[in-house]
Image (cartoon, coloured by chain):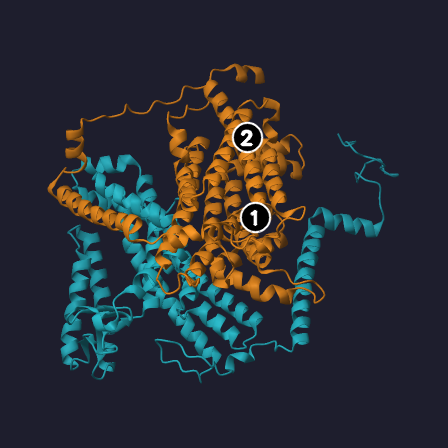
Chain colours: A orange, B cyan
Amino acid sequence: MATQIDALEPLPLPEGPPERRLPPRQWVRENLFGSVLDSVLTVLFGLFLAWAAYRLGKFVFVDADWEIVERNITTLMVGSFPRDQLWRLWAALFVLAASLGFGAGAIGAQRRREVAEGRAQPAPKGVAARRLAPIVLLVGVLLWFSGSLRNLLIVLAVAAVGAVFNLVGRRTPRRLERSVPLLVLAGVLLAFLIVVAFGGVKWSDWGGFLLTIFLAVGGILMSFPVGVLLALGRRSSLRAVRIVCTGYIEFIRGVPLVALIFMGVFMIGFFLPQDVERPDNIVRVLIAFVMFTSAYVAEIVRGGLQSVPAGQVEAAQALGLSPYRTTRQIVLPQALRSVIPALVGQFISLYKDTSLVFVVGLAELLTVAENVTKQPDFLGQGLIVETLVFASFVYWTGSYWMSRESQRLEQRLGLGER
Amino acid sequence: MTAGVGVADAGDSDVPRRLYPDPGLPDRVFRTVLRSGGGFVLAVMLLVGGFLLYLVDNVVGNLERLGIPTGFDYLDQPAGFAIPDSDFSSAQSLGDALIVGVQNTLKVSLIGIVLATIVGVLVGVARLSSNWLVRKSAALYVETFRNIPVLVIILFWYLGVVLRLPPIGEAVEIPDLLVISNRGIVLPWFDKVGEGFAFGLVILVALAAAVLVWIWRTRRFDRSGAPHRRGLWAGGVLLAILTVGFFATGSPWALEFPERGERSTTGGFRLSPEYAALLIGLALYTASHIAEIVRGSILAVPGGQSEAANAVGLSGWQRLRHVVLPQAFRVSVPPIANQYLNLMKNSSLGIAISYYELTKITRVSIAQQAPAVQAILLMMGIYLLISLSIALVTNVVNRRLTLKGRR
């Protein structure tokens, strides 16, 4: 029976409507000047956009004094990270590029096989370049500000390593496919170790964009297991577990993140027995982030759990699987697969929320961007707009890139089409 | 069949009653509890309860050791700080300061919610416009504001825009209407010049009359099917009674226009720079999220609905107003309610620009020797209360909107 199903031809994918291509003139008439109202709107919006573009262009290329960013680019990126240890960051970057390139390659291979078997549609051509555009733009601007040929060469080398490992990833044997996520995670951990271990730099000395990324990545990685447990607990058949988990989730969702950050900074000391060493502020803030994000992750995972059809659990029970194995092998894999885009969304919002540590003065990108305007050379010149625009640009490219990737993922997983 | 699997020892009976050998009473009780899940419940409760007790014990121990009062008596202490843009003086108590903070939080949240909704709905509809330029402009707005942290937006408006407005001496002024300077934005506002009580009664009467007219028009429409125009009717009645009542009670309120002096403005309603920046930042950021929800909800209305509306000859506006938007609205209430909650919670970022809302007041109180643990717990409790109130209102709205028989 099973072999017969395997032998069935995959269903042909539905064809979309044919693309409509209009000659430019007709396109303009249809899309811009369809009616009197349309024409008025087009003119109004055109004028406004032109004015805004002119103002922005004039600010960026003429009025703005970018010297403050140029001279502080290292501080903005890594804060007070010891300058003689910067090689660790570069080394970590190489490892990261290798593991992420490898992961991307492996996913690409998987995808190509799906296309070959007719289970997925091939990606449109020329997308790869557009997908990477925000990141390339970000790196380009950062290199421009750093103005150093050496950095350019290193970045090119990093990109080359990423590309090579991408090729390696494409040749992943099929039986190793399942361990690809673990390998990538191991790479990330290794990169982390390169920075902190063996006489490295403790994270209390991290700052700038590096701290932003550390808080976001560390926060989401630690929130994930807690969130999954909370979600399972909220759906538990045991009332006590359910009440505890629901209470926690609803409490966290009802208070602002700033309040939790304050709690972390001002209150955690009181909760510890007096002989324990007081954690430094980064750890306190990280605890607040994990407390906060895990509640949201739990709600996302709960949505995924609800989307698993009840028949799956019943089938597992009929096969005699224990409740643990039912959850672990039947429910969670399906639930988690369907919530990946939402988890990426949560990561994006955590990435943006790291800026809130500004209120407790932790030296993350936004704080540094504000602090550098108080340097003696730049004091009182009103350069905050320049540094804020720079910080916004960094946040924006990262967030925009990730949200685009998450949309693609959503389409690929075919969510919302079921 | 009766001799099922796992019968280890049926004892002396010929009918096996248990699947296990009799383990003795204590163990039997334990097993029963365990199998019914009670053991696990007990363990969880012990674990969580024990952990909480441990934390509370630590807190109390630490507070005692440091000589910090437990309890909430500190709320009666004099605050020792003044709050800009309010009548609050530093001799009043910390509890009073907290109330001012809650008022300020609500003031920025509620107005922000209204603004964000208006902008968000407009942008969301614009994203689906047939005009390419309008569509792309809306997309540009959404993608820009959605991907920048709200704190950066607020700081930008505060440090980059509001504080850079011209000083009061060179304020931008539309005479008798508006004064814009780096001391804030001043709008005309109503000023009380007479006895207001009678007019208050008139307002109540007018509202009651408007509601009655609304119900009457609706009933009439249900009976006869003639166009109800209940909005027009109720609004007209409201306005008529208010106008007559206003003059009948001797014009107790007058519109007061801002006037610019040398150092400050007098009259009118002043938006402080902090309030204006926080309000604009929150509204623009949240609007970009609401726009996406509105767009998604409109797209979620089946295409057949629009086609059917076209087929029965509705105009573009009628189609939107009577067919598409009501259905989209129904889907969008829960996620938009979520955005309202987010806006309220994000108002805590007022602390970054010294707008004296709940968080800022709490922070200042802690600096003024208020015990941190109680102050933060109290702040969280208040936020939770506001969140729950907003959730309650939106849940009621949602339940009323959900079609009967669905879900």
Q: Position of residue B281 (x, y in %)?
A: 34, 58
**Whole-percent x and y of residue A29?**
14, 34
Name the outermost residue toward the right: B12
- Label 1 crowd (10 A; few <14 / some 14-19 / many >=20): some
Quadrant showing the C terminus of chain A: top left
Residue B135 location in percent, x, y?
25, 41
Say which amino acid is labelled 1: Gly
Q: Residue at x 23, y 36 (%)?
A: B308
Count neighbours of disc 2 (C-alpha within 10 A) and say few if under 14, some if 14 to 19, many if 20 or more. many
User: In the picture shown, does residue A401 fall above or below B60?
Assistant: above
Give the image location of residue B206, x and y in percent.
21, 71
Q: Is residue A217 rendered to the left or right of residue B227?
A: right
Q: Nearer the viewer, residue A75 or B338?
A: A75
Nearer to us in this view, A93 or A153: A153
Q: Amino acid at mark 2?
A: Phe
The number of discs equals: 2
**Helix, strand or loop under label 1:** helix
Which chain is home to disc 2? A
Q: Chain of mark 1?
A: A
Of callouts 1 and 2, the N-terminal one: 2
Q: Is residue A95 left or right of residue A403?
A: right
Q: Residue at x 53, y 27 (%)?
A: A164
Residue at point 30%, 51% (across, down):
B120
Residue drawn at the location 22% of the way across and 73% of the way down: B169
Rendered-image quadrant of the N terminus of chain A: top right
Judged left or right of residue B402, residue B388 is right
Q: CB atoms at circles 1 and 2 under 8 Å apart?
A: no
- Label 1 vs label 2: CA separation? 21 Å
Residue under label 2: A102
Q: Secondary structure at mark 2?
A: helix
Q: Residue A218: which numbered mark, if any? A: 1
The quarter holding residue A20 reads top left
